[in-house]
Image (tube, grey):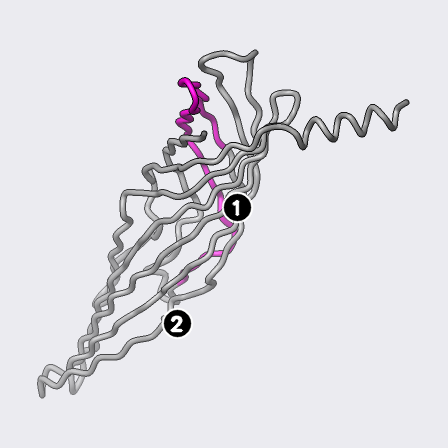
Amino acid sequence: MRLLFLLCSATAAVAQPLSVGVKAGLPWTDFLNTAQSGNFSFTSTTNRYIFGASAELRLPFHLSIELDALYRHFSYHGIGSIIGITTTTATSSTTSNDWEFPLLAKYRFGKKGVARPFVDAGVAFDTLQGLAQTVKTTVLATGSTTTSSTSNPPELNDTSSRGFVMGVGLDVKAVLIHIQPEIRYTRWGAKHFLDPNALLHSNPNQAEFLVGITF
């Protein structure tokens, strides 16, 4: 009898509907932290958007499992000069795409209704794609310039990282869709970038506001 109950429970869980949709939002933190020291400095730009796809499997007892695939783009620039017998300046421009895959367990409070608060927590995997750096070096005395490019800049530490995710939000049911605004925080482990001079490094803390729409 107990085995029959377990089989029925498993079947009911599998039979729960799978919702798919889109998710977009705004980062509240910069992807990179930069600084200036002497003749060397870095600056960064974090594009103020995040977007991607989302899938959610509803389970019994107000629980669900959510998997997202989120995209963002960022860039950073470096400038430095070496002063000596021959003064040389170098400028670098780096761009990259970042893909993030959070896997979350979600719990909704209250009974079925129009609006239900929820909390979620889980893990995330993150990877860089399309990383490219262009370096322009100029010898001031002669005015000669050389340009080089690479997909493996010296400040690159790791192309992937894992982290812990937690969030809080509200699930609003509007006819056939669910609108889910959420505040989410991620603490990353390995740093993508780690400059030897400590002028550039990845931000291990990530906060963002997201809105998901699922069908």
SS under mark 1: strand
Residue 63 percent across, percent down from the top left: 61, 26
Does 102 sit left or right of 203 as displayed? right
Does 130 sit left or right of 56 as displayed? left
Closer to the camera in the image, 30 or 39? 30
Number of marks present in the image shown: 2
Closer to the camera in the image, 125 or 45? 125
Callout 2, which amino acid? Asn
Q: Is residue 70 above or below residue 88?
A: above
Taking the spot 21% from the left edge, 70% from the top edge, the residue there is 91
Q: Main secondary structure of the magenta part?
A: strand
Magenta range is 167-194
192 within the magenta span:
yes
Taking the spot 43% from the left edge, 22% from the top edge, the residue there is 176
Dividing the picture into quarters, in which one does residue 145 lie?
bottom left
Closer to the camera in the image, 174 or 130? 174
Residue 84 percent across, percent down from the top left: 18, 83
73 within the magenta span:
no
Callout 1, which amino acid? Ala
Q: Is residue 45 above or below residue 61?
A: below
**Neighbour tally class for label 2: few under 14, some 14-19, many 20 plus, Cα within 10 Å:** few
Residue 7 percent across, percent down from the top left: 80, 29
Q: Which residue is mark 1?
A: 124
Q: Which residue is mark 2?
A: 152
Q: Is residue 47 above or below residue 6?
A: below
SS under mark 2: loop
Residue 10 percent across, percent down from the top left: 74, 30
